[in-house]
Image (cartoon, rainbow, N blue to C red):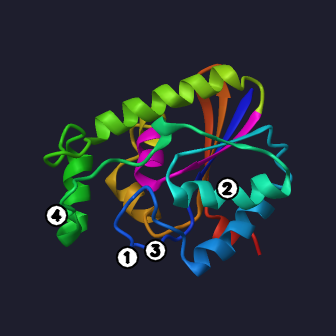
Amino acid sequence: MTKVYFIRHAESDTSVRDPMTRPLTAKGYADCRLVTKFLSDKDINAVLSSPFKRAVDTVKDFADVNNMPIQIVNDFRERRSDSQDSWRDDYAAFIKRQWADFTYSLSDGECLAEVQARNIAALNRVLVEHAGKNVAIGTHGTALSTILNHYDPSYGYDDFMAMVNLMPWVAAMDFNGTECIHIQKINILEAIV
């Protein structure tokens, strides 16, 4: 069995518009210690991450404490929205429309079907490369939600909105080969005291 702990990044500074370089807030950096504590007894064999700074930094404390490198996997990056950020004016409506139609995107953004296909392809490569291991992956809310939806089609808009403000947040997934056999969703802000 392969165990994958997807770690949705800690709170980030949304005043920084560049998605690649957006840092964590002071609270986000502090909450990274909760990620380290949560992962400390999970016998993690590899740490991977989206290339985005906020995802890397969320798993960095754990990687540093355990003297493990972080392998960057570009295909675990977050959804490309739209360079104009026009969706930010009515975030809820944009998100609801994307979840209602997985092929909907703005002019130069990605639809959820594209995000899902890219993330599942990356996950399948990880499952082959790290078969039988325990892996932690720094990720994002939308990217992770499309992965959860792939294995559990009932996971949708309401589930996404229920976790949108939970940062960091964990989805622990058990795999037999590439078949997902169990999913556990964990709010580590409540699980770790």
Disc 4 target residue: 86
- Identify the residue under disc 3: 13
The residue under label 2 is which amino acid type? Val
State the CA–CA distance, disc 1 to disc 2: 22 Å
Q: Is residue 144 left or right of residue 27?
A: left
Task: Tell me, yes or no, if residue 82 can be seen here.
Answer: yes
Label 2 Cα neighbours within 10 Å, binned few <14 / some 14-19 / many ≥20: many
Q: Judge depth for marks 1 and 2 and give the one in front.
A: 1
Q: Amino acid at mark 3?
A: Asp
Q: Quadrant of residue 27?
A: bottom right
Residue 85 x, y percent position in the rendering: 22, 62
Q: Circle 4 sits in a helix, a strand or a loop, which is it?
A: helix
Residue drawn 53% across and 46% down?
Answer: 50
- Image height check: is 54 above or below 131? below
**Disc 1: which residue:** 15
Residue at the spot x=47%, y=62% of the render?
163
Looking at the image, do the residues carrying marks 1 and 3 touch, with CB atoms under 8 Å apart? yes
Q: Is residue 67 above or below residue 91?
A: above
Within 10 Å of disc 1 (Cα), the crowding (few <14, some 14-19, many 20+) is: few
Name the residue rendered at 54%, 76% in the picture: 25
Neighbours of disc 4 within 10 Å: few (<14), some (14-19), many (20+): few
| Amino acid of disc 1 | Ser
For the point 31% across and 48% down, which residue is it? 80
